[in-house]
Image (cartoon, rainbow, N blue to C red):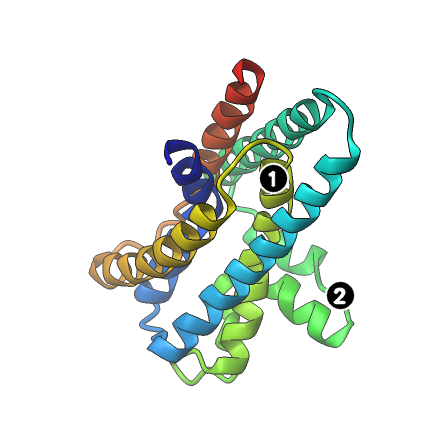
């Protein structure tokens, strides 16, 4: 249960930052859109864990555990370094130019990853179902590697999926509430927390 909770927190922590950003800009997420986001995130996580489980059956001995350790460690270090860099240097304007790709839906998803508030494409002040789909896809990118790497170890898949759906929905709502109460427009970075959690989980794989 504890390992499942750590995995879910590592996957969903970015949702808190997005909820805060939306709350600060007074962008609303209706319940139906919130469900759409969480269905997509949970679905992508389920696919990633299924692929990891399939791969585990073809890998001999302790190799799945070693690969799981390496994947979680690599993603954890990446998140940690990314979070620290973003904390000390605001590169948002450079990032928007760097990831400007002219491929319709692909460009939209990349824009959402760089600036989460771009999911409100029609600037209506709330997130409709189409915009929720793109936001869900953007939020699911982290779950691909984490879900695959975790499934190579021994985890309770149903437990992770249920906790992920509930926790992600709750944390977005909490983020929206906090964002509405925050006056400062300072950039808040949470990915380093995910990084530390994933590194911890990777080290736990060595003891298993």
Residue 96 placement: quadrant:
bottom right
Mark 2 Cα-neighbour bin, 10 Å: few <14, some 14–19, many ≥20: some
Residue 69 placement: quadrant:
top right
Rounded to the nearest whole Å, what is the CA distance between mark 1 and mark 2?
A: 32 Å
Give the mark, 1 or 2, whose residue is nearer the N terminus: 2
Q: Is residue 162 left or right of residue 26?
A: right
Residue at the spot of label 2: 101
Residue at the spot of label 1: 151
Q: Nearer the viewer, residue 36 or 30?
A: 36
Q: Nearer the viewer, residue 32 or 173?
A: 32
Mark 1 Cα-neighbour bin, 10 Å: few <14, some 14–19, many ≥20: many
- The structure residue drawn at horizontal position 70% and vertical position 69%, both measured from the top left corner, is 107
Q: For numbered disc 2, what is the local secondary structure?
A: loop
- The structure residue drawn at horizontal position 59% and vertical position 28%, both measured from the top left corner, is 77
Q: Is residue 50 above or below residue 29?
A: above
Q: Position of residue 70 (x, y in %)?
A: 67, 26
Q: Position of residue 125 (x, y in %)?
A: 38, 81
- The structure residue drawn at horizontal position 65% and vertical position 25%, both measured from the top left corner, is 65
- The structure residue drawn at horizontal position 35% and vertical position 60%, both measured from the top left corner, is 172
Q: Position of residue 134 (x, y in %)?
A: 57, 71
Can I make out residue 151 in this image? yes
């Amino acid at each position: 249960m504890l390992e499942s909770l750590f995995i879910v927190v590592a996957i969903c922590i970015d949702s808190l930052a997005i909820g805060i950003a939306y709350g600060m800009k007074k962008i609303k997420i209706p319940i139906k859109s919130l469900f759409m986001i969480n269905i997509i995130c949970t679905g992508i996580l389920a696919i990633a864990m299924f692929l990891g489980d399939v791969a585990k059956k073809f890998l001999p001995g302790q190799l799945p555990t070693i690969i799981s350790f390496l994947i979680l460690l690599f993603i954890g270090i990446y998140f940690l370094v990314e979070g620290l860099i973003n904390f000390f240097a605001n590169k948002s304007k450079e990032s928007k130019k760097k990831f400007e790709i002219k491929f319709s839906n692909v460009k939209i998803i990349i824009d959402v990853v760089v600036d989460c508030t771009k999911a409100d494409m029609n600037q209506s002040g709330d997130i409709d179902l189409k915009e929720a789909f793109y936001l869900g896809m953007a939020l699911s990118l982290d779950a691909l590697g984490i879900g695959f790497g975790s499934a190579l170890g021994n985890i309770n898949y149903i437990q992770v999926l249920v906790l992920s759906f509930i926790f992600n929905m709750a944390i977005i709502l909490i983020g929206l509430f906090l964002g509405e109460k925050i006056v400062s427009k300072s950039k808040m970075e949470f990915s380093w927390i995910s990084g530390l959690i994933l590194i911890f989980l990777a080290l736990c794989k060595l003891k298993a």
